[in-house]
Image (cartoon, grey):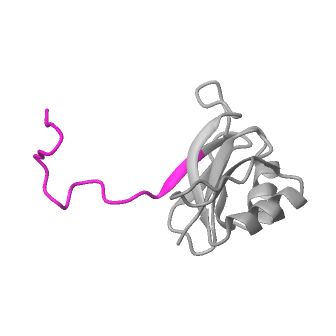
């Protein structure tokens, strides 16, 4: 076992990035519509899976590196919870207004001293996310 600060691996066999984060959804078609049409994400992958009716769907913000996989919710991965993903935007207030105007459930726009403006929002399954304004 290694401890923090020590390593037995070389730089070539370490984790060096993040590709996809799974988000459980109850209806993949509804989720795909929300993420692509409402949030404006690009659809990177939408292919059938071996199990009947299953699909592998990945979406991402335009130009974004890490994608979101819209995975079918199950007992092991239920929908409707805080996901812990923070998306970024150039203008949190404008994004807040835009999402609220199209009926997305958004939280209060927070403007704390020394912290970038941010707010929470939920997808149609009740999965919770944050949007943070970048520099």
> Residue at the location (11% across, 45% down)?
6
> Residue at the location (75% across, 46% down)?
107
In the image: residue 92, left or right of residue 86: right
Question: How far across and how far down the image is residue 12, in percent?
Answer: 19, 61
Q: Which residues are magenta?
A: 1-22
Residue 12 covered by magenta stretch:
yes
> Residue at the location (69% across, 44% down)?
54
Question: How far across and how far down the image is residue 113, in percent?
Answer: 55, 57
Numbered label tally = 0
Residue 17 covered by magenta stretch:
yes
Which of the pair 99/42 is nearer the observer? 99
Question: How far across and how far down the image is residue 130, in percent?
Answer: 63, 51
Pick out the residue farthest to the bottom. Answer: 63
> Residue at the location (13% across, 56% down)?
10
Question: How far across and how far down the image is residue 56, in percent?
Answer: 63, 52
Residue 41 found in image quarter = bottom right
Quadrant where the N terminus sits is top left
Residue 2 found in image quarter = top left
Pick out the residue farthest to the front. Answer: 113
Task: Name the dominant secondary structure of the magenta segment.
Answer: loop
In the image: residue 4, left or right of residue 134: left
Which of the pair 113/43 is nearer the observer? 113
Pick out the residue farthest to the top. Answer: 75
Which of the pair 130/10 is nearer the observer? 130
């Amino acid at each position: 076992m290694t401890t923090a600060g020590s390593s037995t691996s070389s730089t070539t066999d370490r984790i060096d990035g993040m590709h996809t984060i799974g988000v459980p959804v109850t209806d993949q078609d509804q989720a795909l519509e929300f993420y692509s049409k409402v949030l404006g994400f690009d659809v990177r992958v939408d292919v059938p899976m071996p199990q009947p009716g299953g699909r592998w769907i990945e979406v991402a913000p335009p130009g974004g590196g890490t994608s979101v996989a819209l995975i079918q919710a199950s007992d092991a991965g239920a929908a409707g919870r805080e996901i812990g993903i923070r998306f970024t935007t150039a203008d949190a207030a404008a994004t807040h207004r835009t999402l609220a105007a199209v009926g997305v459930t958004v939280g209060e726009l927070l403007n704390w001293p020394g912290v970038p403006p941010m707010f929470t929002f939920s997808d149609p399954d009740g999965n919770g996310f944050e949007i943070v304004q970048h520099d």
